[in-house]
Amino acid sequence: YLEMMNETNLWENGSRIKECYTTIGFIWDDALNSDRILQLNSIGFIWDTLEHAWNKQFYELCAFRARKGHCNVSTNDERNTSLGNWVQQQRKLRKKNTLSSDRIQQLNSIGFIWAW
């Protein structure tokens, strides 16, 4: 049953977590104790979906850089439209001073060009 549950469903629908627990024989009491946290971690539960989404895009950018030799993904690139939009968004966020220093540092570490 756990294999049928995907990460998105686990995060977006708390009742699915409850259903998952009761199906495999656990008692649900609406409290997350350390055992439940460990079990959720063991199946790849994502606690911070925003951080996960950012990291996923960052790793995609790293792969793009490995293939192309640069980080300048065009929003017009049909094969990388989503990544191009994400790259553009990072530039906008930095310009507005709303991109964290950790993320700026990560992007700088792979040769990200801020002015494009």
Image (cartoon, helix red, strand yellow):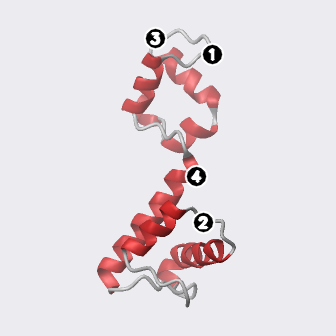
Q: Earlier in the sequence, mark 4 or mark 2?
A: 4
User: To which residue does mark 3 refer?
Assistant: 25
Q: Residue at x 58, y 21 (%)?
A: 18
Q: Are marks 3 and 4 in contact (CB under 8 Å)?
A: no
Label 1, label 3: how many angstroms apart (C-alpha)?
15 Å
Q: Is 76 placed left or right of 4 in the picture? A: right
Label 3, label 4: how many angstroms apart (C-alpha)?
31 Å
User: To which residue does mark 1 refer?
Assistant: 30
Q: Are marks 2 and 1 in contact (CB under 8 Å)?
A: no
- The residue closer to the viewer here, 4 or 71, is 71
Image mark for residue 50: 4
Q: Earlier in the sequence, mark 3 or mark 2?
A: 3
Label 4, label 2: how many angstroms apart (C-alpha)?
13 Å
Q: Residues within 10 Å of mark 1 (few under 14, many from 20)?
A: few
Q: Earlier in the sequence, mark 2 or mark 1?
A: 1
Q: Nearer the viewer, mark 4 or mark 2?
A: 2
User: To which residue does mark 2 refer?
Assistant: 99
- The residue closer to the viewer here, 9 or 114, is 114
Q: Amino acid at mark 1?
A: Asp
Label 2, label 1: how many angstroms apart (C-alpha)?
35 Å
